[in-house]
Image (spheres, rainbow, N blue to C red):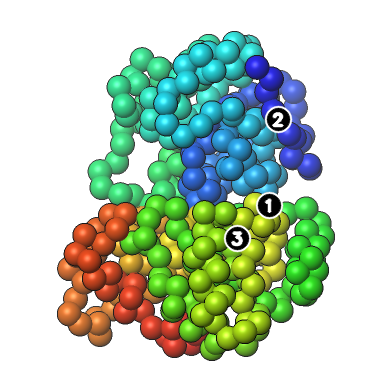
């Protein structure tokens, strides 16, 4: 089995040869989680570790936007299933390449590869009966802690609560992506109306369409191919020519560039929300069934809308956060009652 790898431009370390520790990082499976690992990458790189990240293909582009990462290996695995033979074969290919492995997901299968590759030091959280697969084990914190701190704690260093993810694009990427849409950087807004987790995290399509009619520029809709129908619904309901759907039509790095060049980003609690935060753009993040205490957009220019924390909203949302994929009560008040006019004021404010 061949290893698909790509070296991130400009990411080579300049540390003395004797100071370099070769480290393999097993990445999470979701874009937002991957973004939230960037402070960990920065910490490991700063102390002289040469980083190779192993990631699934749809997550790998996130790590190509991290200058600290020297190499990205795209894993030939799929969601679900142990796929032991494939992991064993890849583990044999990686024998002797690394001194340390950081296993970021909590699953058993994510810890298998470093074990099968005989990496001497294997760091990760306890979970899924993988005690024997890890040499350095952290206890899982209670509740749902902030995810950036959760990942950064694997470095074993203090001061992790001040970390904020940052992504970097190649020079000219923003202007090229905007020009491909007939636009200039800063001349459009971006909506990210999807959420892979489920419908309980999605602001209604009709609300996005209404918001588009209240804004001062064209709106580009970004998402995966699975979200194309949702984006088409918004385009159809918005004033003619106001919205353009690019769902499933851009590479992930082009989507990053369009977000980085946007006048603002409006999104649900999703992976693209964290991308916008990592570029430090103006954004409004809409939370309903999930909590901004757990996965906030770490961006001083971000505004979070969460009716759970609004004392003026009545009756109170005692059901939130439920963290369910669909509203268990059927009313979805936590997002249905977020008015487009209120969001527009924050975008234009």
Residue 10 visible in the current orientation: yes
Residue linked to disc 2: 5
Q: Position of residue 197 (x, y in %)?
A: 40, 52
How far apart, in angstroms, are the residues tagged by discs 1 and 3? 10 Å
Residue linked to disc 3: 247
Q: Position of residue 73 (x, y in %)?
A: 65, 30
Q: Nearer the viewer, mark 1 or mark 2?
A: 1
N-terminal label among 1 and 2 = 2
248 or 82, nearer to the observer: 248
The label number, if any, that marks residue 84 in the structure image: none
How far apart, in angstroms, are the residues tagged by discs 2 and 3? 26 Å
Residue 189 visible in the current orientation: no
Name which residue lies at 42% across and 26% down: 81
Name which residue lies at 53% across and 36% down: 27
Residue linked to disc 1: 251
Quadrant in which residue 201 is drawn: bottom left
Q: Position of residue 141 (x, y in %)?
A: 29, 41
In the displayed structure, does residue 270 sit left or right of residue 198?
A: right
Q: Are marks 2 and 3 in contact (CB under 8 Å)?
A: no
């Amino acid at each position: 089995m061949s290893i698909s790898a790509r070296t991130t431009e400009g990411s080579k370390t300049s540390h003395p040869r004797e100071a370099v520790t070769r480290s393999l990082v097993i990445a999470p499976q979701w874009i937002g989680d991957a973004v939230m690992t960037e402070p960990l990458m920065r910490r490991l790189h700063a102390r002289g570790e040469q980083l190779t990240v192993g990631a699934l293909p749809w997550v790998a582009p996130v790590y190509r936007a991290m200058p600290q990462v020297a190499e990205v290996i795209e894993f030939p695995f799929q969601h679900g299933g142990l796929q032991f033979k494939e992991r064993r074969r890849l583990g044999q290919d990686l024998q002797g390449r690394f001194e340390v492995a950081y296993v970021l997901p909590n699953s058993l299968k994510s810890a298998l590869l470093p074990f099968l590759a005989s990496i001497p030091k294997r760091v990760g959280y306890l979970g899924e009966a993988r005690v024997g697969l890890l040499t350095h084990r952290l206890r899982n914190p209670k509740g749902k802690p902030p995810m950036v701190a959760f990942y950064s704690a694997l470095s074993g260093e203090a001061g992790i609560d001040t970390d904020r993810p940052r992504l970097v694009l190649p020079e000219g990427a923003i202007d090229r992506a905007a020009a491909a849409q007939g636009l200039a950087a800063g001349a459009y807004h971006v909506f990210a109306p999807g959420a892979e987790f489920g419908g309980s995290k999605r602001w209604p399509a009709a609300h996005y369409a209404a918001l588009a009619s209240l804004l001062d520029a064209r709106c580009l809709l970004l998402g995966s191919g699975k979200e194309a129908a949702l984006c088409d619904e918004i385009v159809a309901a918005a004033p003619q020519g106001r919205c353009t759907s690019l769902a499933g039509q851009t590479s992930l790095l082009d989507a990053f560039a369009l977000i980085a060049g946007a006048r603002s980003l409006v999104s649900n609690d999703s992976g693209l929300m964290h991308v916008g935060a990592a570029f430090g753009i103006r954004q409004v993040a809409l939370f309903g069934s999930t909590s901004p205490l757990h996965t906030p957009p770490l961006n001083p220019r971000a505004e979070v809308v969460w009716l759970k924390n609004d004392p003026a909203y009545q009756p109170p949302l005692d059901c939130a956060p439920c963290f369910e994929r669909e509203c268990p009560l059927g009313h979805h008040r936590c997002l249905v009652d977020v008015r487009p006019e209120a969001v527009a004021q924050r975008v234009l404010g």
